[in-house]
Amino acid sequence: MKLELDHVSAGYGDIGVLRDVSVSAESGSVLGIAGRNGMGKSTLIRTMAGLITPSAGTVILDGVDVTREPSHARARRGLTTIVQGRGIFANLSVREHLTMGRVAGQRGKRDRLAEVLSYFPRLEERLRQRAGTLSGGEQQMLAIGTGLMTDPNVMLLDEPSDGIMPTLVEQIGVQLREINRRESMTIVVVEQNLPMIFAMADRCVVLENGTVVLEGDAEQLAAEGSVHKHLALAE
């Protein structure tokens, strides 16, 4: 499922953040969004998710104009969002979280629990454990797993490496790429962790002051060092 932003401007009230942004996540691909803090990355994800309505431009999901659709309507079309900070309920068990994701998924009837646990075996070991007692990496796995339980076609992730040990960051990146390949799922990931983006993404976009200043094939950009150079110059 393809997700596009066409000449989108968006922000918060009178405060503009995104300015004439056009990006496209092709069906079955991984798109990485890089940039320093305050450059508009999270606003971009929130606009894709339907949490912010653009002041200009169009959001297109699977060929349908969803610019004015709220987040829950986009979720029914097959889009799930993993927010920064993970959104975990500390007192719920791992199983209860995953069950909650299954109940929230209105698109299909299949039970994805076994599939989700195959991606994240640590969660199977902790099904009865309260989410608040998990490590940061395990909570991120749980957030992704809960999103997967809705049976999505598109997954948006906002800073999945935030507050996580490097070894688990690498593991989560590997599993997200495996999910993408096995399920042909479109993934958009906002990250400051460039190694994670380059390990996962097919294409990479760099935002600066709410505009796209660099984009291209992720492998090529990594080899050239273009993203690192640009972010260093922008500091």
Image (cartoon, rainbow, N blue to C red):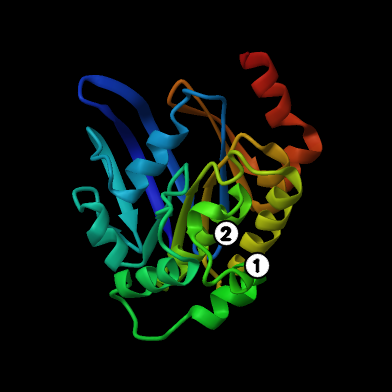
What residue appears at the point 43 percent right and 25 percent down from the top-left corner?
Answer: 210
Which residue sits furthest bottom?
110
Residues tagged 1 and 2 counted as in contact (Cβ below 8 A): yes
Q: Is residue 72 above or below residue 50?
A: below
Q: Secondary structure at mark 1?
A: helix
Q: Which of the 4 image quarters holds residue 121?
A: bottom right
Q: Decide if residue 159 is on the left or right side of residue 53.
A: right
Front position in the image: 163 or 196: 163
Which residue sits furthest right?
223
**Residue beneath disc 1:** 122
What residue appears at the point 67 percent right and 54 percent down from the top-left corner?
Answer: 173
Amino acid bearing label 1: Arg
Is residue 182 in sight in this rendering? no
Q: Residues within 10 Å of mark 1 (few under 14, many from 20)?
A: few
Q: Secondary structure at mark 2?
A: helix
What residue appears at the point 31 percent right and 74 percent down from the top-left corner?
Answer: 103
Q: Is residue 49 above or below residue 74?
A: above
Q: Is residue 14 above or below residue 58?
A: above
What residue appears at the point 43 percent right and 47 percent down from the top-left corner?
Answer: 83
Q: Which of the 4 image quarters holds residue 159?
A: top right
Q: Is residue 49 above or below residue 18?
A: below
- Residue 90 position, x and y percent, is 43, 53
Is residue 178 in sight in this rendering? yes
**Residue beneath disc 2:** 141
Amino acid bearing label 2: Met
- Residue 209 position, x and y percent, is 46, 20
| Quadrant placement of the N terminus | bottom left
Q: Decide if residue 166 is on the left or right side of residue 11.
A: right
Front position in the image: 25 or 107: 107
